[in-house]
Image (cartoon, helix red, strand yellow):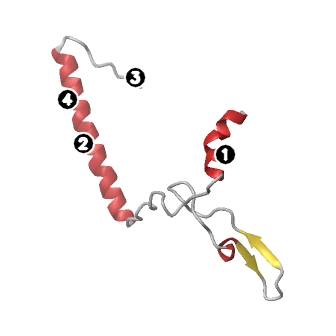
Amino acid sequence: MRFEEFTDCLAWWKERKENEHAWRVRPEEVLKYDDTGLLVSANLDLKNPNGPQDAEHLPPEQLVDGILSKEKRIMEIMEEVKEALQGNGLSWVSRQ
């Protein structure tokens, strides 16, 4: 990386205001201690609260139905393409 690539970050650093890319985190959200006060872990993988939400988890049956529906539509479109090619005097080549 070149120094110039840090221009935006350095400009932000002077005032450090929260925005869609920068947010405050409490130490207890990052650092975990055991009962004796010994540091056990530091979680640096905190998600951006302003970022996109996680995808909805659907039941497997619903996922399969959605995939099959899309595959059927793809086959319909491919048939239309095949017919259009045949109408133009072009042949459909199948390599197996």
What residue is at 45 percent from the left and 57 percent from the top? 52
Label 4 element class: helix
Residue that lies at the very extreme toward the front in this rendered image: 15
User: How many other residues sit within 10 Å of disc 4, few (<14), some (14-19) or many (≥20)?
Assistant: few
Label 3 sits on residue: 95
Q: In which quarter of the image is residue 17?
A: bottom right
Characterize the local packing of mark 2: few (<14), some (14-19) or many (20 or more) Cα atoms within 10 angstroms: few
Q: Which residue is drawn at 35% across and 57% down?
A: 64
Q: Which amino acid does label 3 sit on?
A: Arg
- Please report whichever mark, 4 or 2, sits nearer to the chain's N-terminal start: 2
Q: Which of marks 3 and 4 is in front?
A: 4
Q: Which mark is residue 61?
A: none
Q: What residue type is labelled 2?
A: Arg
Q: Rounded to the nearest whole Å, what is the CA distance between mark 4 and mark 2?
A: 11 Å
Mark carried by residue 80: 4
Cα distance in 3D space between marks 3 and 4: 19 Å
